[in-house]
Amino acid sequence: MAYGLTFGAAVSDRVDIGSNASIENLTTWTALLWVRQTTLTDLRVLLALDANNQLFRLDLAAGNIEVDCTRATTSLTYTTSDTPLASAGAWKCVAATVDHAGSAGELANIYHGNLTSAMAESTYGTQTDGAGAFTVSGTGGWIGNTSALTRSFQGDIGPVALYNRVLSLAECEAWRLHPSRLIGSGCVGFWILGNGGSTGTQADLSGNTNDGTVTGATAASTQLALALHGPLVTTGTRVRSLCGGLV
């Protein structure tokens, strides 16, 4: 069974995950994604939240990634320097955490791993906490683009998980190993993009009904080599199979 959606044929390719309360105005969050980039272009987006005020995206063509959050005076910007996405054509697991109330120098973290290497924290070329109130009043979320519809990621995106808390490195590593399972509490969005080759509605397996609407993206031809179809994920008091519906 294939997993993943291919983005980037058009700059508007995206999955719109809506604006339900569970993913609005997040002041603490973790995003985890399996991605396979095919082309490196500056500022192409993995995930956008709060009407683009909180972004997880590529930075420059070298393969670095960046977290950028709008603040009243100066934006928070953490950019890697170890080029975690420099090698095109291979699946990689990337994660970002943000805590608006965190300690100075630790408001964000970026982790990365792959099919054989454990998650590790990136080194940073830019690590700016910024200043002023965070802008979190916007609505809407997008996988693989922003609301401007001009920054489509170029490559494949598979499983995506969004939490309303900061996950530890160990928890991110647990998700890399088992991306079809929820890790502790606080999951507000969970999508296995392209599950079974589907380009229709992308079900939110977290139980928060943030189902994704696909525009432009197509079924990935390069399968993510993980046995995602076997385990089950919990959604509140019921269980949803990745191969089917609630059981």
Image: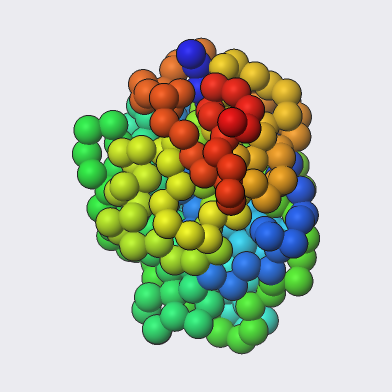
Residue 123: percent from left, percent from top = 28, 60
Residue 66: percent from left, percent from top = 47, 56
224 left or right of 156 in image? left
User: How many numbered circles are shown?
Assistant: 0
Looking at the image, the residue that sits furthest to the left is 117
Q: Who's the residue at 36% across and 38% down the image?
A: 178
Scheme by which the image is coloured: rainbow
Give the quarter of the image for residue 27: bottom right
Please indicate, yes or no, whether residue 101 appears anywhere in the rendered image.
Answer: yes
Q: Is residue 51 above or below residue 203?
A: below
56 left or right of 175 in image? right
Q: Who's the residue at 64% across and 40% down the image?
A: 204
- What quarter of the picture does the C terminus occupy? top right
Please indicate, yes or no, whether residue 88 appears anywhere in the rendered image.
Answer: no
Q: Who's the residue at 22% across and 39% down the image?
A: 117
Q: Who's the residue at 49% across and 66% down the image?
A: 165
Residue 193: percent from left, percent from top = 58, 30
Closer-to-camera residue (190/239): 239
Closer-to-camera residue (233/102): 233
Residue 75: percent from left, percent from top = 57, 73
